Amino acid sequence: MNLFDGLTLLGGLCFFLFGMSMMGDALEKSAGDGLKNLLAKLTTGKLKGFLTGLGVTAIIQSSSATTVMVVGFVNSGLMTLRQAINVIMGANVGTTVTAWLLSLTGIESSSLVVQMFKPTSFTPILALIGIILYMVDKNGKKRDIGMILLGFAILMFGMDTMSGAVEGLKDVEEFRNLFLLFKNPILGVLAGAVLTGIIQSSSASVGILQALSSTGQITVGATVPIIMGQNIGTCVTALLSSVGTNRNARRASLVHLSFNIIGTIVLLTAYTIVTSVIDFSFVSMAANETTIAIAHTTFNVLCTALLLPASSLLEKLSYKLIKKTPDEEKELLVELDERLMATPAIAIEQSRILASTMAQTSERAIQTALELLKTYKAEDAALVREDETACDHYEDVLGSYLVRLNTHPLSERDSNESSKLLFAIGDLERISDHAVNLLASAKEISDKSMQFSAQAKQELNTMISAVSEIIGLTTLSFCNNDLSAAAKVEPLEQVVDLLKSQLRARHIVRLQKGECSIEAGFVWADLLTDLERVSDHCSNIAGCVIEMAHESMDLHEYLHKVKSDSPEYTKMYNAYAEKYSITA
């Protein structure tokens, strides 16, 4: 092996790692909804948690990425430590899929049918299809599929290049002697752990081992401890990710490490004892891509079968390693963990959940404020202020998080969802501000013992009922993407506008007749303004929900069109106008 072979090996490794990263990122992006659906099924059940981890890792082709996600979930309080343990075990099995894909490079046969399954035969076609899809579709599903195919083609090209570059090593005595050292299981485990810890991917290090196996100088007996060490080395990513997290998140990363260390110790001990007693011929056979994939899968499946029933013991061990403190329950949970940005679809989903909480908080603030207009209570007034403060906090957290998230590659669907959330949180925060304004008016009415006429009270109650309904419809439409509820908001908002004009005109008449004081008139005007502006913000949010469902953000065009061209809109408007009509 000369200098140029070394450079070729280095170039092949670069292509291999780049292709793996490109394919994994594209798979994540393309399978966003699939990831959401899988993670939504998380339960305390061992089997379901295990299958979730397996499924997510099989989709994104990285157990490290799955484990980092799990650390982020635990740090955010979205997943318990017990759930995390089951998912981590599933991730260890899911990562074996990559080794089986890479084993295709070892196919050798003169049969044309078999040769068609060799990557060098079909990856050029995949690359051609991939580049066409990538070039034709600038920002959509086809582009993501194109990137997956290109990533896979580059990965396989890198694998083939590495295999070709190391082919000359089969006649190098020193190389053979190097792998003879790894018959010492401790050295093999250390080598696998160090290599994987450096590149932070067990799938990639297994691929490198498969490429080296093409020399025929690596025995099955040498690969087994290396593979076990690779599973330990992949824990580095999760351990680094857990720095600065809460205690439970750090325990989750330690569970990942202890799971692989315990599994390695038990299985390596059993393997060493059995092979020393029984002389298996396959141990001294030359390893190839397929036998390495088999060994990788066997180890991970056996390790999981051994420790999945004992997951509660792993949980107890993590509490021994990171002891529980009296003030641990007071640790603040991170509402939106930065680690989740590595998987944008999950980060968007968590942002949506927090935005839904914000919408519900904003609605609660308004509904409480509306009740205070009827009967003022100091304790309820404090709740309104708390909700408004919470909405301010949610807007700050969500706004900064989504802006940072938009610097990551997002699918078209996730980009639209991010835009909707950014658009809506401003209106939700303003709604909570108006709740505080209504509270101030309610307090002034109570403090000054203001009295409105019976007619004025009836009119105000009508307006309050309309606003109460519109805020409920808006929250429903936003939290559930309910287009039916969203469609009812705009006609009701127009009725609220009409009510404001009518109530203002009627109040002026009462002022002229001396039936109302000037001071009460100012409060009345403030009330009408705040109530009408709440409905305006509701209209903005509901319009955004409808427009984003049609992948557009032109709210003004939507409002113009729905008012002028929709018989359904006219029907709903008339129904609301009748429902909230005011008597003379």
Image (spheres, rainbow, N blue to C red):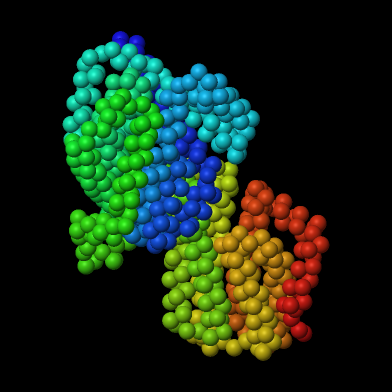
Residue 42: name its quadrant: bottom left
Q: Quadrant of the C terminus?
A: bottom right
Q: At 41% from the left edge and 19% from the top edge, which residue is drawn?
A: 161
Looking at the image, can residue 568 be seen? yes
Above or below 65: residue 579 = below
Of the pair 576 and 234, the residue shown nearer to us = 234
Say which of 114 and 121 sits in front: 114
Instruction: Single out the residue that lies furthest toward the front.
Output: 278
Residue occupying the point 26% across, 27% down: 284
Q: How many marks?
A: 0
Residue 101 drawn above or below residue 44: above
List x then y, in percent, for residue 525: 62, 74
Quadrant where the image shows the N terminus: top left
In the displayed structure, 556 sits above or below 406; it is below
Residue drawn at x 38%, y 34% is: 293
Q: Position of 176 compared to 63: left or right? A: left
Please name the residue shown 43% across and 52% down the image.
51
Horizontal and vertical percent position of residue 522 = 60, 77
Task: For residue 193, say whether it is visible.
Answer: no
What percent of the width, then of the height, locates residue 529? 62, 70
Across and down, in percent, residue 397 comes to 43, 55
As rendered, which of 54 and 545 lies closer to the eye?
54
Residue 215, placed above or below residue 434:
above
Which quadrant of the view contains residue 108? top left
